Image: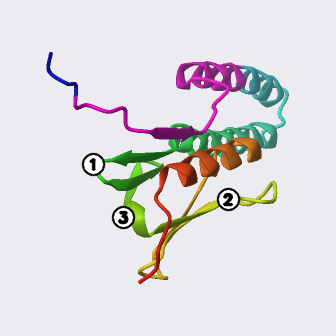
Amino acid sequence: MPRDHSREQPQWLLARHSALTARQLLRAYGLLCLFSLVIAAAFALRGLWYIPVFSFAELILVAAALLHYLRHARDYEHIALRDGELVIEQVSAGQCRRHHFAPWCTRIAVPQGPRQLIHINDMRDATRHVAVGVFATPERRRQVAQELGALLPPYLGP
C-alpha cells in the first residue's frame, strides 16, 4: 500500500472578534438615523433649526466611525509552517503583508506580560522581525508562541 506523503502542516489563525455582522451594524445605524431624524424634524417644526444641523453632524461622525469599524472587522494574522518555511500573513484593512522566515534560523520570543506580543526574529538578519498576536488573548499568545517554538529546530548560530 502506498504511503501518504501529505503531512498536516501546523497553522494558527488569530482573528479579530466582531460582535456584529455588517448587516446587523447597518440595521442598527439605520434605526439610529430614523430615530435621530424624527427627533430633529420635530425640533425643526418648532423652529429650532440648529438641532437638525447637530443631528446630521452626529450621524456623519457615527457613519465615519462605523466605516472604520467595518474596514477592520476582517483583520487577521495567519501563521503557518509549510514547505520548509515559516509564513506569517497579516491582513489589516484589506492590506496583506506576508513575511517568510527560514525555520532553522528563526527565534520565537514568548510573551511574558499581558500586553506583550509574540516576536519572531530572523537570527541571520537583525532587522527582520515581526510582532504577531494583536487579536489574541495573552494566554492564547503564550500558547501559540510555545507551540511554534516547539516545532522549530533550535538555532545553532552562524
**Of the numbered discs in the image, which one, if any, rests on residue 102?**
3
Mark 3 → mark 2, Cα distance in angstroms:
18 Å
Q: Is residue 82 left or right of residue 38?
A: left
Q: Is residue 10 left or right of residue 5?
A: right
Q: What's the residue at 79%, 25% (across, down)?
A: 45
- The residue at the far left in this view is 2
* Image location (x, y in percent) of residue 117: 67, 59
* Magenta stretch contains residue 32: yes
Q: Are marks 1 and 3 in contact (CB under 8 Å)?
A: no
Which amino acid is tagged 3?
A: Ala
* Image location (x, y in percent) of residue 84: 30, 53
Q: Helix, strand or loop at disc 3?
A: loop
Mark 1 → mark 3, Cα distance in angstroms:
10 Å
Q: What's the residue at 52%, 43% (across, down)?
A: 75
The residue stretch that appears in magenta = 5-34
Please tell me which residue lies in front, 120 or 84.
84
Q: Residues within 10 Å of mark 3 (few under 14, many from 20)?
A: some
Q: What's the residue at 54%, 20% (across, down)?
A: 23
Which residue corresponds to mark 1?
83
Which amino acid is tagged 2?
A: Val
Q: Are marks 3 and 2 in contact (CB under 8 Å)?
A: no
**Of the numbered discs in the image, which one, if any, rests on residue 110?**
2
Q: What's the residue at 68%, 20% (across, down)?
A: 34
Q: Helix, strand or loop at disc 2?
A: loop
- The residue at the far front in this view is 1
Which amino acid is tagged 1?
A: Asp
Above-or-below relation of 145 to 11: below
Q: Residues within 10 Å of mark 1 (few under 14, many from 20)?
A: few
